[in-house]
Amino acid sequence: MLLECHHCEAIVDAKEIANFVDVDEAWNTKYTFGNCPACNSALLARQFDTGDGWDKPVRVFPPRDRNLHSSVPKPIRAAFTEGRACFRAKLFTAAAIMCRKTLEGICSAHGVGSSTADFSNGQKSFARSATKQRTMSPLQLRGKTLAIRSNLRKRSLSTSSLTDISSKSSKSVERRQSRHQRKRQQRSRKAAASDKS
């Protein structure tokens, strides 16, 4: 049975150890537990009964890489997929560049800053569907984080307002010190008056 070994990063002829057939009204599903002949890592495959026999086995453990949702624009999906392929091939510089391109596309789709990549196709549909989803993928979460940071920078305090705040804080410190000084003077007057009597 040919399966992709996650550890060896190669397609291997897995050695079958055990089978289990789940009989259902709609589909018969066959699960095969095996191991890689090269590294001896565990593999679990699933096959469906098509009526003409079992279809091609698909590895279900270790889990395969998840694909991005179809609402993600094709250029972003392509950059992400290529980055993942570069990482698997141990081309780390190329993987980092593709990750940057993916992040630029996400930022562009959410209207955050300018980018060097052109990801204008499907911006509105991607942004709409991303806000409708309850859970966010790590890439969507990163895009939202970048958008929030950008908004915070836009709303950051100007230098004049910072000067105003620092002068206000120094005035409040002066007021507090003068209040303490007045209380000390009142205590000393009361002590002097009690000494006279």
Image (cartoon, rainbow, N blue to C red):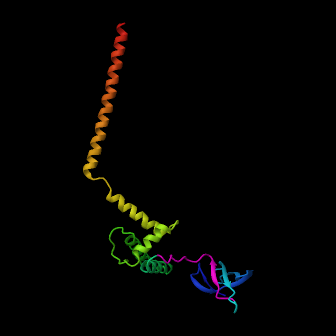
Q: Quadrant of the C terminus?
A: top left
Q: Is residue 52 magenta?
A: no
Residue 109 is drawn in which quadrant? bottom left
Picture quadrant where residue 9 is located: bottom right
Q: Residue 59 in magenta?
A: yes
- Asked if residue 29 can be seen in this view, the reply is no
Q: Residue furthest bottom?
A: 52
The one nearer the camera, 129 or 166, is 129
The kind of secondary structure the magenta stretch mainly shows is: loop
Q: Is residue 32 above or below residue 164?
A: below
Tell which of 81 and 89 is nearer to you.
Answer: 81
Identity of the residue drawn at 43% across and 65% down: 144
- Seen at 44% across and 66% down, the residue is 142
Residue 87 position within the rendered picture, expressed as x and y whole percent measured from the top left = 48, 77
Q: Quadrant of the N terminus?
A: bottom right
> Residue 38 at x, y = what percent?
63, 83
> Residue 71 vs residue 13: left or right?
left
Q: Position of residue 51 (x, y in %)?
A: 70, 90
Which residue range is magenta in the image? Answer: 54-71
Vertical comparison of 111 with 122: above or below: above
Whether residue 161 is visible to the viewer of this picture, yes or no, is yes
Q: Residue at x 42, y 80 (%)?
A: 75
Location of residue 50 with respect to 146 vertically, above or below: below
